Image (spheres, rainbow, N blue to C red):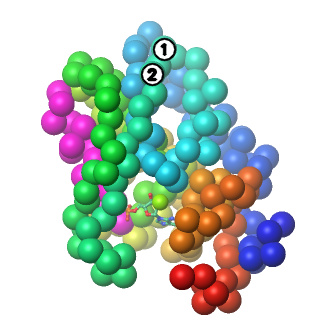
Amino acid sequence: MHSDVQRILYSEQELSAITDRIAEKINEDYQGRQLVVVGILKGSVVFLADLFRKLTVDCTLDFMAASSYGNSAVSSGEVKITKDISTDIRNKDVLIVEDILDTGNTLSYIKKYLGSFSPSSVKICTLFDKPCRRLKPITPDYYGAAIEDLFIVGYGLDYAERYRNLPYVGVLKPETYNLTV
Ligand code: IMP
Ligand code: MG
């Protein structure tokens, strides 16, 4: 275990089982359809790389990146798209893949934005859901696990851009937050 990590919440094996379960459901739901998977950079990439290889439906892959306006301490709730998709999603089934659904600001903006291109459907798949922090009325169509109000890292999720490479998901030692930034 990384020396900055206090405890592991989800092991590699548990994450693999979660990804299996989500992929199975997506494969069932989109059978015979053409799916455009849209990963949200950067947090989703590790989960998405595993999930994508478990999809058996006909699908393509694209990416978007978004950031919140203003400073992060006082989130304005406004979202800026910093990388857009290059796929024509008109009349296509779109599945947004995200690492974690927190306040919902990012995904509600992105969902509305993608919806403006007249896709057949837009659904949300997130590895983690923190429903207690929600500010926007949005729920995931697929999620791996609901978590309490905890800041987690690993398996793509970062703290100040670090720890994305951890193969498990964990909580950092409190002193780590004082050392970085
Ligand atoms: P939202 O717009 O508040 O839902 O923010 C979602 C984004 O915040 C996610 O894509 C993550 O990048 C980040 N985030 C929220 N909670 C955590 C966490 O516990 N660990 C790491 N990143 C998080
Ligand atoms: Mg992030």
The circle drawn on residue 60 is 2
What label does residue 58 carry, if any? 1
Question: Closer to us: mark 2 or mark 1?
Answer: 2
Q: Residue at x 49, y 51 (%)?
A: 42
Quadrant where the image shows the C terminus: bottom right
> Would you place residue 166 above or below residue 144 in this image?
below
Which quadrant, please, contains the N terminus?
bottom right
Of residues 112 and 129, the one nearer the viewer is 112
- Label 2 SS: strand
| The disc label shown at residue 74, or none | none
Task: Label 1, secondary structure: give it.
Answer: strand
Q: Classify residue 157 by image quadrant.
A: bottom right
Above or below, 106 relative to 94? below
Residue 114: image location, x then y, percent: 24, 37
Left or right position of 50 against 121: right
Residue 171 magenta-highlighted: no
Q: Amino acid at mark 2?
A: Thr
Which residues are drawn in magenta? 103-118
